[in-house]
Amino acid sequence: MLFHVRMNVKLPANMPADVANEIKAREKTYSQELQRSGKWRHIWRLVGEYANYSIFEVGSNAELHDLLSALPLFPYMEIEVTPLCRHPSSVRDGDA
Amino acid sequence: MLFHVRMNVKLPANMPADVANEIKAREKTYSQELQRSGKWRHIWRLVGEYANYSIFEVGSNAELHDLLSALPLFPYMEIEVTPLCRHPSSVRDGDA
Amino acid sequence: MLFHVRMNVKLPANMPADVANEIKAREKTYSQELQRSGKWRHIWRLVGEYANYSIFEVGSNAELHDLLSALPLFPYMEIEVTPLCRHPSSVRDGDA
Amino acid sequence: MLFHVRMNVKLPANMPADVANEIKAREKTYSQELQRSGKWRHIWRLVGEYANYSIFEVGSNAELHDLLSALPLFPYMEIEVTPLCRHPSSVRDGDA
Amino acid sequence: MLFHVRMNVKLPANMPADVANEIKAREKTYSQELQRSGKWRHIWRLVGEYANYSIFEVGSNAELHDLLSALPLFPYMEIEVTPLCRHPSSVRDGDA
Amino acid sequence: MLFHVRMNVKLPANMPADVANEIKAREKTYSQELQRSGKWRHIWRLVGEYANYSIFEVGSNAELHDLLSALPLFPYMEIEVTPLCRHPSSVRDGDA
Amino acid sequence: MLFHVRMNVKLPANMPADVANEIKAREKTYSQELQRSGKWRHIWRLVGEYANYSIFEVGSNAELHDLLSALPLFPYMEIEVTPLCRHPSSVRDGDA
Amino acid sequence: MLFHVRMNVKLPANMPADVANEIKAREKTYSQELQRSGKWRHIWRLVGEYANYSIFEVGSNAELHDLLSALPLFPYMEIEVTPLCRHPSSVRDGDA
Amino acid sequence: MLFHVRMNVKLPANMPADVANEIKAREKTYSQELQRSGKWRHIWRLVGEYANYSIFEVGSNAELHDLLSALPLFPYMEIEVTPLCRHPSSVRDGDA
Amino acid sequence: MLFHVRMNVKLPANMPADVANEIKAREKTYSQELQRSGKWRHIWRLVGEYANYSIFEVGSNAELHDLLSALPLFPYMEIEVTPLCRHPSSVRDGDA
């Protein structure tokens, strides 16, 4: 089951650089583990923004919430989730 | 080069069914040709809406505009284009 | 798996009353069948609006889209879908 | 009488973790008491957000305001209240 | 129990004047009956707009919906309902 | 001359409780004086929000601004003013 | 007493040119009479828009509503009214 | 050449009163000089808001930007500029 | 003096194709004349939209309004005008 | 390939003046280098705002993101990117 997720990151202006860097490093590791597991199917940067569009493939709404709320940057993110389904014109096997 | 596109379709309430069906049939053929060519990489339906999120891979902004403005449903669509680039955490080869 | 759905109905001002009534009658029958099947768990009217908040329980995003797009009033609705999951404070068995 | 309530929680970025945890613990206890009393009929988490949709059943507007403004997280919440009534298509006894 | 209601009226541009006048006459009669009954406590015109702010006093959400959806202008209105309760600084007996 | 006023209060998260309480006490006294004078005709709490809808009766725009800008909570409020006039369907003597 | 008014004009696309011209001619006459009377103090065109910003000087809210609702273009306008008062830095006698 | 300008002032909650007062005093002096020069033609307070509508008469866009960005309160303002021109119904000599 | 202009075109769904084509042909001729005269400095298509961003260089607000309101597509456009001035970092002679 | 970029700058109110000045000086140097290289084709100030509209010419989305995210003011900016292509009415060689 596929979900479209937009994540906007807003770090507090007064967060020390080393704190920010440590959170970002954990975020990267966590994201890459989920990508390799197949649950985080795509992640793209929006040009000019500290934001991404992502596609998740999970077994349930609950699993998606668990994955998202465990993001190290979760407390500093605005997240918007849109459920997807197969488009009748799609010719691609994997697209839901 | 990848672009994220949201398309919302709004057919006029008084469009005859056969006219609508003919346009939709041409739209489907056109979309599937572009998908098979690799330029329209993904298309997903938004649950509960007459809308889709799509990913295009094209050589230039101009090519994307030509593809979109040739959509049979183009006169009845609201389209929002967002340029994408590779996310530094991405582990997937194809994601820009 | 639970989803929160808001449906706003906007019938064209020039739709004849008997056409509108026939569509609404089919909508009611369809809605009640889905409610009895357990897939449409709740439906509430918003006071003063031609709109409802509903809770659906379905097996997948695709099933929800199929149910919603088959609504007789679907061409005249704006629909907004929000995926839900169990709240950590919930004490109710059925709430996801 | 039923009300639909959306609650968005925004804790200040500089709130110490133990203060936040203590407030959340009181919030959970308070919420569960109201749920067991029947006044807070449903609570669902929105996937990917620190937010919930809830259904309250109370005797009056004033009772609802008293319940909401006594939430331990109330000073850190944005709350949106929508009055509900029975939908003419509803087949469920309890839905208003 | 008090509710704040904003009503915006949008008549179709092609509605014949006599049809509009007949609906407005019925609206006025209906409104004045409800005002005299005490259920429609206040109605004020917004300067420069075809809109009003009103205060209703009813026994339940359902009663308010029944009153509003029976307005002759209801099919041509956008209505926004806000539940009210007594303000702790109020010195007026009747204000909820 | 009547005006509809919406006031939203947003106290800074780090304001000490005793400072907030002192301001609120002055606000209450001030509000009640104006209510007793007849200039602040109504005040209602919006359910679930730190906000009110109020009706003022004043002799001029300038008088209204003087009353509002002297509110002890004025620096922490968002205020929206809408001029009202008598509705042609009104049956109430006092409503403008 | 001064009011700031924004008027946006939206004529129906299918209104015959002679009907539109006749309404506009009456609008112009009416506007100029009010300007000469001193009640419509200023009117400026917004560059690139079929819209104006105006300043009215009237004795009451009711007078302003009567003037605005008598505009020949009133049924085709969106109007936004903002009450003004003298600014403490103003050096001009006439500005409220 | 005339421009309509809306200025909203938002002073930081923790700015000391004497600092704020000093800035406001300079703002007033500066504003009154520009008014006397004829470049700042009008300034009106919006009732209930820390905001103003103003009319500037300047020789160029650049001159307007220089005047606005030199406002002592500029760093604490949101400013919206709208270019104006003479309205075809205007009877007033000075209105552009 | 430079202005940034966004134009969105919305032709009525029921406009006959030959009428639309005739208007578009006149629009193109008119636009190219203004471009050649130097007053319409730039025009770019927004990818995927029936819209453009343009830069005009004119002597006054009034001149810009005259140019825009004479566009053959003006009755079917939403136009947003933003006055520009030279940026202090600009190194280009022509940019205002 | 051309892109339209809007940049809004919001420096924290408590940033010391010398820190702000140092960042702005680096921003200016960086901007001017990119302008001279031809990649940052235009930059204009919006009158009355701490914001600019810019036109970039780059070889790819990724190049644009790299340029923008390296801006010294990037952490304090809101940036909105719109892909452009040649307008069919354009007569200018360089406009995409």
Image: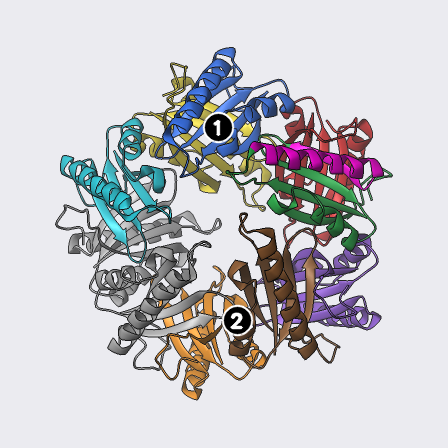
Chain colours: A green, B red, C purple, D brown, E orange, H cyan, I yellow, J blue
The prevailing secondary structure element of the residues shown in magenta is helix
As drawn, the residue found furthest toward the top would be: J37
- Label 1 – label 2 distance at C-alpha: 52 Å
E6 and A12: which is toward the camera: A12
Name the quadrant containing residue J22: top left
Residue carrying label 1: J73
Q: Secondary structure at mark 1?
A: loop
Examine the image and state in which quarter residue H15 appears. top left
Q: Is residue C84 left or right of residue D78?
A: right
Residue B67, placed above or below residue H7: above
Query: Which residue shows up at 69% across the image and 59% down it?
Result: D45
Residue labelled with disc 2: E74
Who's the residue at 44% across and 25% down the image? J23
Q: Which mark is residue J93?
A: none
Q: Position of residue B28 (x, y in %)?
A: 78, 40
The residue shown at (72%, 70%) is C42
Q: Position of residue I58 (x, y in %)?
A: 33, 25
Q: Secondary structure at mark 2?
A: helix
How far across and down, in percent of the image, does residue D95 sit?
A: 69, 76
- Please tell me which residue is depicted at 81% across the width and 71% down the height of the picture: C33
Q: Chain of mark 1?
A: J
Q: Is residue I12 above or below residue E61?
A: above
The answer to whether residue C85 is magenta is: no
Is H73 positioned to the left or the right of H34 in the image?
right
Which residue is outermost to the right?
A93
Pick the quarter of the image with the C terminus of chain J: top right
> Which stretch appears magenta?
A17-45
The residue lying toward the viewer, choosing from A44 and E48, is A44
- Amino acid type indicated by mark 1: Leu
H45 over J4 or under it: above or below: below
Observer able to see residue E91: yes
